[in-house]
């Protein structure tokens, strides 16, 4: 795996802008209803690796079903560029399709079963060595 890279991204209209540190080239394609509809490709990063540069005031939140996740989207253009998985505080889930000039070839897209979320996040924590205790 290569070194980390700071990438910029945002929504379609440009109101929402963020920077994210990309350390892992592996992204997940979730098969749940909303992610399928959006074509959301997940890059889960610790909060510290994500910086919302602008757009906090235009973000709206969509919740559905029993999920605790906040699906945040730009209320001007409707694009979901990232969200906060509330079941895993401290992480931000970025849609790599919303990164500037992204070449999806640079990512390794892995099919992702929503029910495996816990397992995947645990693996991610180990990869990133976020459990210092
Ligand atoms: Zn927008």
Image (cartoon, rainbow, N blue to C red):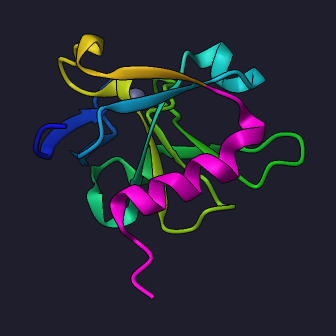
Image quadrant for the N terminus? top left
Q: Residue at x 38, y 63 (%)?
A: 47
Quadrant of res 48: bottom left
Q: Residue at x 35, y 60 (%)?
A: 128
Classify 132 as above or below 61. below
Q: Quadrant of ligand 1?
A: top left
37 or 72, nearer to the observer: 37
Q: Position of residue 64 (x, y in %)?
A: 82, 40
Residue 50, image x and y in percent? 30, 55
Camera-nearest residue between 75 and 107 = 107
Magenta includes 30? Answer: no
Left or right: residue 63 versus residue 1 is right
Image check: 41 left or right of 55? right
Quarter holding residue 16: top left
User: Is 34 on the left or on the right of 21, as rendered?
Assistant: right
Q: Is residue 55 above or below residue 48?
A: above
Is residue 114 on the magenta stretch?
Answer: yes
- Give the magenta range: 112-133
Image quadrant occupied by the C terminus: bottom left
Q: Answer whether residue 53 is visible to the viewer in this image.
A: yes
Residue sitting farthest toward the bottom: 133
Point out the residue furthest to the right here. 66
Q: Is residue 49 above or below residue 55?
A: below
Residue 43: percent from the left, percent from the top? Answer: 42, 38
The residue closer to the viewer here, 2 or 89, is: 2
Q: Is any part of residue 12 visible from this angle?
A: no
* Magenta span: chief secondary structure: helix
């Amino acid at each position: 795996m290569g070194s980390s890279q700071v990438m910029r991204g945002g929504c379609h209209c440009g109101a929402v802008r963020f920077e994210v540190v990309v350390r892992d080239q592996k992204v997940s394609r979730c098969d749940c209803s909303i992610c399928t509809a959006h074509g959301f490709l997940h890059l889960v990063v610790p909060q510290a690796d994500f910086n919302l540069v602008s757009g906090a005031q235009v973000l709206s939140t969509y919740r559905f079903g029993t999920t605790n996740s906040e699906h945040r989207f730009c209320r001007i253009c409707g694009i979901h560029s990232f969200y906060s998985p509330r079941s895993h505080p401290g992480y931000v889930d970025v849609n790599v399709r919303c990164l500037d000039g992204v070449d999806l070839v640079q990512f390794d897209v892995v099919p992702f079963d929503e029910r495996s979320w816990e397992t995947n996040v645990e693996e991610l924590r180990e990869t990133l060595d976020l459990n210092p205790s």
